[in-house]
Amino acid sequence: MKQGRAHSLSNNNSNPKNVLLIDADEAFGRVLQPLLGQGYQLLQESSGTSAIAAFETLTIDAILLNLDIPDQEESSRVLQSATNRDLPLPVIAYSWDASRQKALNAFKEHAFDTLTQPLDVQQLRFALDRACRRGGLARELAEARRLLGSSRVEGLLGSSKAMDRVCDVTRKVAEVFTTVLVTGESGTGKGLVAQAIHRMSPRAPKPFVAFSVCSFPDSLIEDELFGHEKGAFTGAGQARRGRFEEANGGTIFIDEIGDLALPLQAKLLRALQERTVERLGSNVPRPLDVRVICATNRNLEKMVEEGSFRQDLYFRISVVKIQMPSLSERKEDIPLLAEHFLRSFAKIHGKAARMLTPGFLSALSRYSWPGNVRELQNVIERSVVLANGHEYLGVADLPEELRGLMVVTDDVPAGSFHEAVQGFKKELVRAALRVHSGNRLRAAAELGISRCYLHRLLNQFNLAEEERAPEEPEEMDDDEPMLREFEMPKPELRRPSAGMA
């Protein structure tokens, strides 16, 4: 493998992006490295075969591919190998082809971008910046998914210890036939746990029937659960099955069980004990094979002590208990959940939003989330729907009430308000620069401040050297050197080569 000289304009950047150049002309690589600057480490391969071996074994952030080769199938193989991996690599292809036919073919094979020679340094840097940023985000997402592990339960997102415990019990209880009680605050995902248990159980091919006690008045609940015979009451023109019969062979999920009236609790207990139901207007028991999962956001133990919930029913429904953590108890899961909701709602609503900025995520992490995951889901959907067509969701896209509360936190020690604010500013600046690969102009725009103010903050927090940016395409002078000064001869004028030309 031929490696271009790792030229840096400064020694401050200890973590440059690795760019694989696939071009047979070593002189081209030597010229290109210093023009790209300190933000990039250029590695060069002369053939597609050696290049494929390189990016399968090395950490590569982006690929520069010369399309002007005698064997077009070789460039096609490189594109396919780079883009069809579990973690695709962004490929920027370049060519002398003025007709752009080669570029069109490269796009069809999922090239990230295409450029026409002679190459413009500003344009090339901008393309590389976008490609490396996209690749970095893809790696972060892949790592988050890896942390979920193969043992994750489908539908239950999170890598926190609290969710690990939930998933562990969910997997175990799915394999056996027993009643389950899922507890937790509203919006924590109790229904998702019930669905996961059913989905992983031998009953998965059979019906999953959900019923919420709070959705019906007490006078209708018995009919909804157990059904009625024709003529059982005025208006009962025909017999109807209840939810238990609909779930026969499968699972019934009774939500908000703590709100069930005492007389109905007795009837439910009888159905669970005898595994039969009697429709209204009939005294004929109908045998059932139904798994029962209940959920509540109330303290049933306390209700039993107060006499508002039957103790025998409580013991019957709580053979296994699963406690769902509140979102405030697993804030480390917020970025993963937010990214999942972002992708889902961007697709549903046809929006361009693809990424969450550090400021946006910081605001989410500082909020108390009384509505838990459901509230987070609603906030992300609102932000996606009302975003102004840009690719990033920032603090400005959050609901006003959330922006107003974002700096309110219970864990700031007394007397340290100024230090807390300064620390928060420092982390916002550092995170914005990291997301924009050190580009101060874009970081300032993301933070909603001027570039001059950003410079003052960098100096104030001693970040000027730590976060020294690579050369920024937006601020290059009109006389910035361009690769056209080092134009390579057109393919037909090059000396024939067995490798890539």
Image: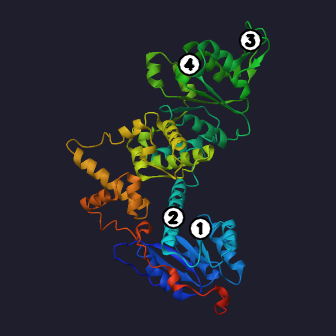
Asked whether the residues under the numbered discs 1 and 4 touch, taking CB atoms below 8 Å apart as contact, a structural biologist would say: no
Asked whether the residues under the numbered discs 1 and 3 touch, taking CB atoms below 8 Å apart as contact, a structural biologist would say: no
Render colour scheme: rainbow
Q: What residue type is labelled 4?
A: Leu
Q: Going from the N terminus, do you reach mark 2 or mark 1 first?
A: 1
Q: Residues within 10 Å of mark 3 (few under 14, many from 20)?
A: few
Task: Kindly identify which numbered label has been placed on residue 113.
Answer: 1
Q: What residue type is labelled 3?
A: Asn
Asked whether the residues under the numbered discs 3 and 4 touch, taking CB atoms below 8 Å apart as contact, a structural biologist would say: no
Q: What element carries label 3?
A: loop
Task: Kindly identify which numbered label has been placed on residue 260.
Answer: 4
Quarter holding the C terminus?
Answer: bottom right
Task: Kindly identify which numbered label has been placed on residue 283.
Answer: 3
Residue 479 appears in the picture as rendered: yes
Mark 2 and mark 1: span between their CA atoms? 10 Å
Residue linked to disc 2: 130
Q: Is mark 1 on a helix, strand or loop?
A: strand
- Give the vertical position of 388 relative to 71 (above or below): above
Asked whether the residues under the numbered discs 2 and 1 touch, taking CB atoms below 8 Å apart as contact, a structural biologist would say: yes
In this rendering, which labeled residue sits more in front, label 4 or label 2?
Answer: 2
Q: Residues within 10 Å of mark 1 (few under 14, many from 20)?
A: some
Mark 3 and mark 4: span between their CA atoms? 23 Å
In this rendering, which labeled residue sits more in front, label 3 or label 4?
Answer: 4
Q: Going from the N terminus, do you reach mark 3 or mark 2 first?
A: 2
